[in-house]
Image: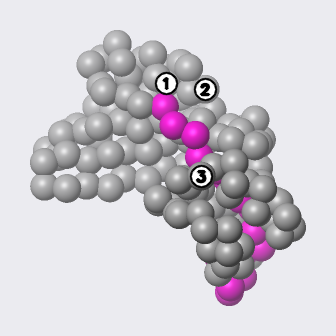
Amino acid sequence: MKVNQISIFLENRPGTLEYATRVLKEAGINIRALSLADTSDFGILRLIVNNIDVAEKALQEKGFTVRRTSVVAVEIPDRPGGLHGIVEAISRKGVNIEYTYAFVERSGENAIIIFRFDKTEEAIEALMESGFTVLPGEKLYKL
Protein backbone atom coordinates (compact mmCIF):
# COMPACT_ATOMS: atom_id res chain seq x y z
CA MET A 1 0.00 0.00 0.00
CA LYS A 2 3.02 2.28 -0.21
CA VAL A 3 3.47 4.71 -3.06
CA ASN A 4 6.85 5.55 -4.58
CA GLN A 5 7.67 9.23 -4.71
CA ILE A 6 10.75 10.99 -6.04
CA SER A 7 12.26 14.08 -4.45
CA ILE A 8 14.41 16.35 -6.56
CA PHE A 9 16.72 18.93 -5.03
CA LEU A 10 16.62 22.15 -7.01
CA GLU A 11 18.66 25.32 -6.72
CA ASN A 12 16.39 28.24 -5.91
CA ARG A 13 17.04 30.31 -9.03
CA PRO A 14 15.08 31.15 -12.20
CA GLY A 15 14.83 28.34 -14.76
CA THR A 16 15.64 25.37 -12.54
CA LEU A 17 12.07 24.10 -12.24
CA GLU A 18 11.53 24.67 -15.96
CA TYR A 19 14.58 22.52 -16.76
CA ALA A 20 13.41 19.69 -14.48
CA THR A 21 9.91 19.65 -15.98
CA ARG A 22 11.40 19.75 -19.49
CA VAL A 23 13.52 16.68 -18.74
CA LEU A 24 10.38 14.88 -17.51
CA LYS A 25 8.38 15.98 -20.56
CA GLU A 26 11.05 14.76 -22.95
CA ALA A 27 11.13 11.39 -21.11
CA GLY A 28 7.36 11.02 -21.56
CA ILE A 29 6.63 11.32 -17.83
CA ASN A 30 3.18 12.35 -16.65
CA ILE A 31 3.06 14.01 -13.22
CA ARG A 32 0.20 12.72 -11.05
CA ALA A 33 0.80 14.91 -7.97
CA LEU A 34 3.46 17.35 -6.79
CA SER A 35 4.64 19.53 -3.97
CA LEU A 36 7.34 22.19 -4.09
CA ALA A 37 8.84 23.55 -0.87
CA ASP A 38 11.69 26.01 -0.77
CA THR A 39 14.25 27.73 1.38
CA SER A 40 16.42 30.65 0.37
CA ASP A 41 19.01 28.45 -1.40
CA PHE A 42 17.25 25.33 -2.64
CA GLY A 43 13.89 23.65 -3.04
CA ILE A 44 12.57 20.13 -2.82
CA LEU A 45 10.23 19.06 -5.59
CA ARG A 46 8.27 15.95 -4.59
CA LEU A 47 6.51 14.07 -7.38
CA ILE A 48 4.23 11.11 -7.93
CA VAL A 49 4.66 10.13 -11.59
CA ASN A 50 3.36 7.49 -13.97
CA ASN A 51 6.79 5.80 -14.34
CA ILE A 52 9.21 6.42 -11.49
CA ASP A 53 12.08 4.35 -12.95
CA VAL A 54 12.16 6.33 -16.20
CA ALA A 55 11.75 9.66 -14.39
CA GLU A 56 14.53 8.91 -11.92
CA LYS A 57 16.95 7.81 -14.64
CA ALA A 58 16.21 10.79 -16.92
CA LEU A 59 16.72 13.30 -14.10
CA GLN A 60 19.92 11.68 -12.83
CA GLU A 61 21.37 11.62 -16.36
CA LYS A 62 20.84 15.39 -16.50
CA GLY A 63 22.64 15.93 -13.20
CA PHE A 64 19.76 16.26 -10.76
CA THR A 65 20.02 14.87 -7.25
CA VAL A 66 17.05 12.50 -6.95
CA ARG A 67 15.86 10.49 -3.96
CA ARG A 68 13.16 7.83 -3.89
CA THR A 69 10.92 7.58 -0.82
CA SER A 70 7.78 5.73 0.22
CA VAL A 71 4.64 7.69 1.00
CA VAL A 72 1.02 6.75 1.64
CA ALA A 73 -1.97 7.91 -0.45
CA VAL A 74 -5.34 8.08 1.26
CA GLU A 75 -8.61 8.69 -0.56
CA ILE A 76 -11.31 10.57 1.34
CA PRO A 77 -14.62 12.20 0.48
CA ASP A 78 -14.13 15.85 -0.57
CA ARG A 79 -16.03 17.42 2.33
CA PRO A 80 -15.32 19.38 5.53
CA GLY A 81 -13.61 17.29 8.20
CA GLY A 82 -12.14 14.70 5.84
CA LEU A 83 -8.54 15.46 6.77
CA HIS A 84 -9.32 15.69 10.48
CA GLY A 85 -10.52 12.07 10.58
CA ILE A 86 -7.20 10.85 9.18
CA VAL A 87 -5.10 13.00 11.49
CA GLU A 88 -7.16 11.82 14.48
CA ALA A 89 -6.65 8.12 13.58
CA ILE A 90 -2.91 8.66 13.14
CA SER A 91 -2.56 10.68 16.33
CA ARG A 92 -4.17 7.91 18.41
CA LYS A 93 -1.38 5.52 17.27
CA GLY A 94 1.43 7.95 18.13
CA VAL A 95 2.58 8.24 14.50
CA ASN A 96 4.10 11.52 13.32
CA ILE A 97 3.17 13.14 10.01
CA GLU A 98 6.38 14.50 8.47
CA TYR A 99 4.67 16.27 5.56
CA THR A 100 1.59 16.04 3.41
CA TYR A 101 0.10 17.39 0.19
CA ALA A 102 -3.23 16.81 -1.51
CA PHE A 103 -5.15 17.02 -4.72
CA VAL A 104 -8.77 16.58 -5.75
CA GLU A 105 -9.51 13.97 -8.38
CA ARG A 106 -12.89 15.50 -9.29
CA SER A 107 -14.32 18.49 -7.48
CA GLY A 108 -17.04 17.48 -5.03
CA GLU A 109 -16.09 13.81 -5.08
CA ASN A 110 -12.87 12.46 -3.59
CA ALA A 111 -9.63 14.04 -2.49
CA ILE A 112 -6.34 12.18 -2.35
CA ILE A 113 -3.90 13.11 0.38
CA ILE A 114 -0.25 12.06 0.22
CA PHE A 115 1.46 11.52 3.58
CA ARG A 116 5.00 10.87 4.70
CA PHE A 117 4.92 9.22 8.16
CA ASP A 118 7.73 8.39 10.57
CA LYS A 119 6.20 4.92 11.06
CA THR A 120 4.71 3.98 7.70
CA GLU A 121 3.48 0.46 8.50
CA GLU A 122 1.81 1.57 11.75
CA ALA A 123 0.15 4.45 9.91
CA ILE A 124 -1.25 2.17 7.18
CA GLU A 125 -2.58 -0.21 9.82
CA ALA A 126 -4.24 2.65 11.75
CA LEU A 127 -5.82 4.05 8.58
CA MET A 128 -7.21 0.72 7.47
CA GLU A 129 -8.53 -0.10 10.95
CA SER A 130 -10.36 3.24 10.88
CA GLY A 131 -11.97 2.44 7.50
CA PHE A 132 -9.97 4.77 5.27
CA THR A 133 -9.11 3.83 1.70
CA VAL A 134 -5.34 3.52 1.30
CA LEU A 135 -4.51 3.57 -2.41
CA PRO A 136 -1.90 1.26 -3.90
CA GLY A 137 0.76 2.93 -6.03
CA GLU A 138 -0.41 1.15 -9.18
CA LYS A 139 -3.80 2.89 -8.97
CA LEU A 140 -2.30 6.32 -8.28
CA TYR A 141 0.24 6.13 -11.12
CA LYS A 142 -2.60 5.49 -13.61
CA LEU A 143 -4.92 8.35 -12.57
Q: Residue furthest front?
A: 94
**Three-letter amino acid code of the residue under disc 3:** Lys
The boundaries of the magenta stretch are: 68-83
Q: Nearer the viewer, residue 64 or 85?
A: 85
Q: Main secondary structure of the magenta part?
A: strand
Marks 1,2: beta carbons within 8 A: yes
Q: Position of residue 15 (x, y in %)?
A: 20, 39
| Residue bearing the label numbered 3 | 119
Q: Position of residue 32 (x, y in %)?
A: 59, 44
Crowd tier of the residue under label 3, counting other residues whose Cα lies within 10 Å: few below 14, some 14–19, many 20 or above: some
Nearer to us: label 2 or label 3: 3
| Residue bearing the label numbered 2 | 51
Crowd tier of the residue under label 2, counting other residues whose Cα lies within 10 Å: few below 14, some 14–19, many 20 or above: some
**Three-letter amino acid code of the residue under disc 2:** Asn
Q: State whether residue 80 appears in this view.
A: yes
In the image, is residue 132 above or below residue 67?
below
Q: Check if residue 69 falls in the magenta segment.
A: yes
Q: Residue furthest bottom?
A: 80
Q: How many marks?
A: 3
Q: Nearer the viewer, residue 55 or 28?
A: 55
| Element at label 1 | helix
Q: Position of residue 124 (x, y in %)?
A: 73, 54
| Residue bearing the label numbered 1 | 55
